[in-house]
Structure formats: structure tokens, C-alpha cells
Image: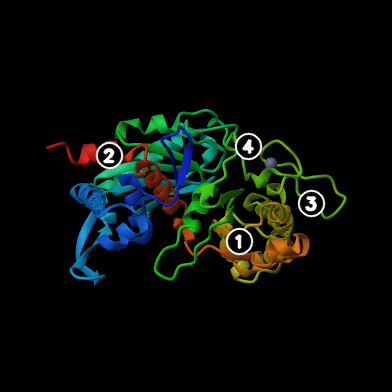
């Protein structure tokens, strides 16, 4: 829906008319393939305008002609497809103890990836230098594809427009650091996003013909720490300072009267201090079951270690308590768990389900599904590529991209 001035100086709503070339490209990003006739039907544009838009996108290599399509009368209408492999995005999903870096195609699909162990507490320079080396490795391995953008995911609140982390509860030394500026040497747009938000975006976009579309969802990232991302009506809810959805550092519903546990953020009684990966490692050590990292917690659960199963189930209930009010307030269609701890699967999921269905308003859970992400370790980089694509192909930037790709004859 867009707005136009009518002759009398009043704004009028123009329904579903996609006038801009970026909006025609958005149709291809959403549907993959469309015939010329499809574009005319969906956009409401005249044939000549559609021809001009398709011509511009085709000349830039953003869509490819894939031959004849269905005929709607007379001549068959030629079909076009979004050219996902026209260029690539460099993406990195940084967690507290490691990152996944990937080259993704323009549709968000990772086609080369690598991982590194890090300690996010070492600060931005040490971690981002490792990201640089991972990017160099990926570019070398993949015959240096054309890179059109960079997406960086971090486990803390992000001031999205500035590309900086703001007041991170755990990322000591990252506060205000110019992450986008660090990558300026690549000469492409850089997007910095909270890790749980990028996962939420990846979940919200359907992939494949029969994929389920999640328009209103809460994504829970469960790793060393706990984060959540909110996507409603297909848009990330960031809040006015980028802090929306940081449920890991909201107050946990303590089940007993003991003193609230200290959290990494300096506060006490946070959800993360009970249900975060680091808290589970602490609690396992206390009962004589050593686990060096979250991966070991997961493998203990999979092997049926009684203490690990008990603690992870309990963490699931506590998470469910933390999310239940959010469900009543926002009425999401899905809650999707990702991150290393989510690999515990049903053991974790059952606790979350139990409490959410028990404590949220019945109407808010009538159609709610609570599940583990099917994107695995690539949820973050996929979402980052999609967010970077949204920026690059958005109506603000698409014209300059096309001008660069197809210099005026
Ligand atoms: Zn905390």
C-alpha cells in the first residue's frame, strides 16, 4: 500500500500498486519465479511499465529469463527468476563462545561456511580480526564472488541504524564500538543486527514451495546466554533503543525462596542466571557432572544423563514462564527455539510448552506452535543475509545499485 497526492492536495491510499523497480524485485525475492503476466497482475502496472522494470532488472542481472511460461491468451508470457547467485553476502553470526561465518547467495542461502571459537569478552578488536580472517578464507575458497554486502550478528542489543552495540549486558568492551566502521574497507554496505533478531527474520521467511510462513513469531536463541527476537507482520520489533526482546535479563520466576542467583550482567535473578547455557554448566558442576561447554551439556542430555536431563527440563520450564506473559501480550503464531541448547530438543521443548500453555491466556495459545528451528546452525547467517538484502534492495538503495550495475548507455 502506498500513498499519493490527489489533485486537491489530499493524500489518497493507492492499494497494492507497486510502482517502484525495487517493489518489482521484491516480488521476485518473495516468489522466486514469475511470468511477465504475473507481474502485471500482481503489481497493477501497465504492460509497458512492467516491461521497463523487468528490462532494468534483467540488464542488471538480478533476474534471468527462464523461457516461456503459461499462456493467458495468445502469446506465451516469458518467465523470469530471481538470480540468487548474481552476487553474495558475507555474514557472521557471533555468539559468546564462537561464530559461524558464511557466504550466502542473494536469497539468503549459505553456500560456504566456516567456524571459529572465540571469547566475546576479549572485546571487539580480537573477535573482529578473527572474523576478517574467516571472511578471507571464505572468499579464497569460493573463487572470490562479487560481494554486495556484509551482515554481522552480535549477542547483544544493537542500535541498528548506527551499526553499533549499545549497553550490552555481557559484551564487555563492545559498548558503542563502530562495528560497521571496522568493515568499511570492504567498500560495501554493512548491517549490524542482534543475533536473535536475525534468527527471527530467517524463520519468518518461507523457503521452498510448501514451507510454512511465520508472520508473527518469537525466536528464542539459547546458547551460552539467552536472547529473543520478535518479528510481527514480517517486521523486526527493535524498540526505540534496540533493547526489545532481551528476555535473558528479565527477572526469572524463582521456584523457591532461596536468594536470587547472580547473573553475568551484574544483576541478580535474571532468566539467564537459571536457564542460560553457562548457568547449566555451573549447576552440573555443583552436582559433580563436569561439562566444559554448551555442546557437552547437549551431549550429556542426548546420552540420557539424569542430572543433565533434569536441569535442562527445569530450564525449559523457567523459559516457558519467562515467555508466557509475552505470549499473552503479543499473541505470536509461533515460538521457535534455536541456538546450541535447542539441540536438546524435546527435553527442553516440553518444559517450555508445559508452562506457556499453562500460564498464557487460552486465546493466545489456541493456534500457537512451539518448535525447534529447522535451520540449525545457519539460522543466524541466513537471517543476516536476508536483512542485508532488504537494505540493499530496499526502495532507498535499489536505484543506486542499478545505476552502478548498468551505467547509463
Ligand atoms: Zn542478567
Q: Mark 3 vs mark 1: which is more N-terminal?
A: 3
Along the line of sight, the residue nearer the viewer: 208 or 220: 208
The disc, 1 or 4, on the residue closer to the chain's N-terminal end is 4
Model colouring: rainbow
Crowding near the residue tagged with mark 3, few <14, some 14–19, many ≥20 C-alpha atoms within 10 Å: some
Q: What residue appears at the point 75 percent right and 45 percent down from the top-left corner? A: 251
Query: For ligand 1, which image quadrant applies?
Result: top right
Check the image and report above or below for 152 versus 165: below
In this rendering, which labeled residue sits more in front, label 2 or label 4? 2
Label for residue 333?
1
Quarter of the figure with the C terminus: top left
Q: Secondary structure at mark 2?
A: helix
- CB at disc 4 and ligand 1 closer than 8 Å: yes
- Residue 354 screen position, x and y as percent: 73, 66
Which residue occupies the foreground of this view, 235 or 134? 235
Q: Looking at the rendered structure, which numbered label has been put on residue 169?
A: 4
The reply to whether the C-beta atoms of the residues labelled 1 and 2 are less than 8 Å apart is no
Q: How many marks?
A: 4
Q: Position of residue 365 (x, y in %)?
A: 69, 64
Asked if ligand 1 lies within 8 A of label 1, the reply is no
SS for callout 1: loop
Left/right of residue 172 with respect to residue 52 in the rendered view = right
How many angstroms separate mark 3 from mark 4 (CA)? 20 Å
Q: Tell us which disc is closer to us: 3 or 2.
A: 2
Q: CA distance from mark 2 to mark 4?
A: 37 Å
Query: Which mark sits nearer the N-terminus, 2 or 4?
Result: 4
The residue sitting at the right extreme is 257
Q: CA distance from mark 3 to mark 2?
A: 50 Å
Q: Residue at x 49, y 41 (%)?
A: 193
The disc label shown at residue 401, or none: 2
Which sits in the foreground, 258 or 78? 78
Q: Secondary structure at mark 3?
A: loop
Amino acid at each position: 500500500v502506498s500513498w499519493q497526492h490527489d489533485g486537491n492536495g489530499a493524500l489518497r491510499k493507492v492499494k497494492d500498486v507497486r510502482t517502484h523497480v525495487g517493489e518489482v524485485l521484491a516480488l521476485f525475492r518473495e516468489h522466486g519465479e514469475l511470468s511477465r503476466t504475473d507481474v502485471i497482475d500482481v503489481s497493477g502496472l501497465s504492460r509497458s511499465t512492467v516491461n521497463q522494470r523487468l528490462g532494468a532488472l534483467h540488464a542488471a542481472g538480478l533476474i534471468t529469463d527462464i523461457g516461456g511460461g503459461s499462456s493467458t491468451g495468445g502469446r506465451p508470457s516469458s518467465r523470469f527468476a530471481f538470480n540468487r547467485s548474481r552476487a553474495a553476502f558475507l555474514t557472521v553470526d557471533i555468539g559468546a563462545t564462537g561464530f559461524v561465518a558464511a557466504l550466502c547467495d542473494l536469497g539468503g542461502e549459505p553456500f560456504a561456511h566456516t567456524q571459529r571459537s572465540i571469547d566475546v569478552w576479549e572485546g571487539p578488536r580480537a573477535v573482529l580480526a578473527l572474523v576478517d580472517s574467516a571472511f578471507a578464507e571464505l572468499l579464497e575458497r569460493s573463487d572470490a564472488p562479487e560481494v554486495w554486502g556484509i551482515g554481522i550478528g552480535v549477542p547483544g542489543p544493537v542500535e541498528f541504524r548506527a551499526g553499533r552495540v549499545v549497553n550490552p549486558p555481557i559484551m564487555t568492551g563492545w559498548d558503542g564500538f563502530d562495528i560497521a566502521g571496522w568493515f568499511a574497507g570492504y567498500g560495501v554496505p554493512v548491517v549490524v543486527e542482534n543475533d536473535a533478531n536475525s534468527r527471527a527474520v530467517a524463520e519468518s521467511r518461507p523457503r521452498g514451495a510448501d514451507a510454512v510462513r511465520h508472520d508473527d513469531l518469537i525466536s528464542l536463541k539459547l546458547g551460552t546466554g539467552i536472547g529473543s527476537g520478535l518479528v510481527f507482520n514480517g517486521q523486526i520489533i527493535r524498540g526505540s533503543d534496540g533493547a526489545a526482546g532481551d528476555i535473558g535479563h528479565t527477572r526469572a520466576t524463582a521456584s523457591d525462596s532461596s536468594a536470587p542467583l547472580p547473573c553475568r550482567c551484574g544483576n541478580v535473578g535474571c532468566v539467564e542466571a537459571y536457564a542460560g547455557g553457562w548457568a547449566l554448566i555451573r549447576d552440573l558442576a555443583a552436582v559433580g557432572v563436569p561439562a566444559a561447554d554448551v555442546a557437552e551439556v547437549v551431549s550429556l542430555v542426548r546420552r540420557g544423563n539424569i542430572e543433565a536431563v533434569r536441569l535442562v527440563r527445569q530450564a525449559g520450564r523457567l523459559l516457558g514462564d519467562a515467555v508466557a506473559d509475552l505470549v499473552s501480550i503479543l499473541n505470536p503464531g509461533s515460538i521457535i527455539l534455536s541456538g546450541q541448547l535447542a539441540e536438546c530438543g524435546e527435553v527442553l521443548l516440553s518444559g517450555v510448552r508445559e508452562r506457556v500453555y499453562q500460564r498464557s491466556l487460552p486465546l493466545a495459545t489456541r493456534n500457537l506452535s512451539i518448535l525447534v528451528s529447522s535451520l540449525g546452525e545457519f539460522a543466524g547467517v541466513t537471517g543476516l543475509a536476508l536483512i542485508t538484502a532488504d537494505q540493499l534492495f530496499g526502495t532507498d538503495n535499489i536505484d543506486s545499485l542499478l545505476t552502478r550495475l548498468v551505467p547509463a548507455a
